[in-house]
Image (spheres, grey):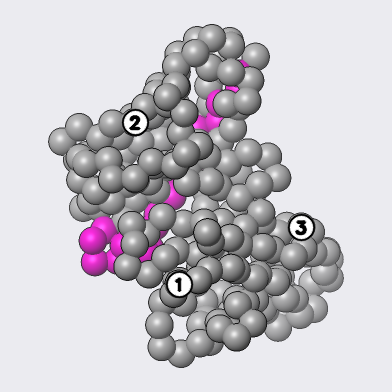
Amino acid sequence: AQSVTQLDSQVPVFEEAPVELRCNYSSSVSVYLFWYVQYPNQGLQLLLKYLSGSTLVKSINGFEAEFNKSQTSFHLRKPSVHISDTAEYFCAVSLSGNTGKLIFGQGTTLQVKP
Amino acid sequence: DTGVSQDPRHKITKRGQNVTFRCDPISEHNRLYWYRQTLGQGPEFLTYFQNEAQLEKSRLLSDRFSAERPKGSFSTLEIQRTEQGDSAMYLCASSSGQTAYEQYFGPGTRLTVT
C-alpha cells in the first residue's frame, strides 16, 4: 500500500529565511507527486506537481520540489519565505495510470514570523 | 466563480440524524472525488466518480455512507445515522480527463455531530 510521511508537523521560520518541508513516500509502483497548500480559511490549492521528465519542478511563487526516486522523497523548498507563505502544506501521491485518487501526508504547518 | 462549490459550508447535527452534502464540480470535469479531513490530518480518499459511475470506494466508507452523481454533474454524499466520529471536513474535488492528476478542491463542508 502507498503512504506519505511528512516528517515535520510544524516548521517555524523567520521571514526571508530559506525553508524545506520534507516529504517521503512509500510505493512499490510508479507514482505522481504533488504539493498542495491550504491558506487559513481557504480550500486546498495545487502548488506544484511531478508527473514525469525533469525531477525539479517549480511553482510560480518561488517554491520548488525535487523528486528523488532513490530516496523516495519529494521535499519542498523556498530560498526566501514571506509572511504570506504561512499556511498548511500537504504532500500527496497518486498512482500513475490509476483513478487519480490522492493519498495525502499529515500536513506541515509553515509559520513565517516577522 | 467557476470553481468547485460545496453546500452547505457548515452543518451541525445531532447523533443519529441523516445529513446530505452537495458538490458542484467544474462544469467540464468528468472526474469527481470525495475526501474526508479530520483535525490535524491530511485528507483521506472516500470515493471516486467518472461521469455518473462510482468506480472506487474506500474501506473508510461504511454502509452508512452513500454517494451519487446522477447525470454525471453534481454529486451528493449522504451519511445516515451520524456518529460523533463522523465529525470532519468533507472535501470534494474534480478533474478533467486530460489532466486527471490536477484535482481542484472545493472549500469543504464542515460537519459537527453533537
Residue placed at 59% from the left, 32% from the top? B88
Within the magenta stretch, is there residue B102?
yes
**Dots 1, 3 in contact, CB < 8 A:** no
Residues at circles 3 and 2 in contact by the CB criterion of under 8 Å = no
For mark 3, what is the residue?
A: A9
Residue on which disc 2 sits: B67
Residue A85 horizontal side relative to residue A93, left or right: right
Crowding at mark 1 (Cα within 10 Å: few <14, some 14-19, many 20+): few
Main SS class of the magenta portion in the image: loop
Left or right of residue B38, residue B107 in this image: left
What residue do we see at 27% from left, 40% from top? B54
Left or right: B62, with A25 as reference point: left
Q: Residue, x 52% and y 76% (percent of image)?
A: A59
| Between discs 1 and 3, the one toward the N terminus | 3
Q: Which residues are magenta?
A: B96-113
Residues at discs 1 and 3 both on one chain: yes
- Residue named by callout 1: A29
Tell me the distance, in whole angstroms, between the alpha carbons under discs 1 and 3.
27 Å
- The percent position of residue A82, horizontal first and vertical second, equals 71, 70
Q: Is residue B53 above or below residue B103?
A: above
Q: Is residue B103 above or below residue A51?
A: above
Cβ–Cβ below 8 Å for labels 2 and 1?
A: no
Q: Mark 3: which amino acid?
A: Ser
Nearest the viewer among B113 and A109 is B113
Dot 3: what SS?
Answer: loop
Callout 3: few (<14), some (14-19), or many (20+) C-alpha neighbours within 10 Å?
some
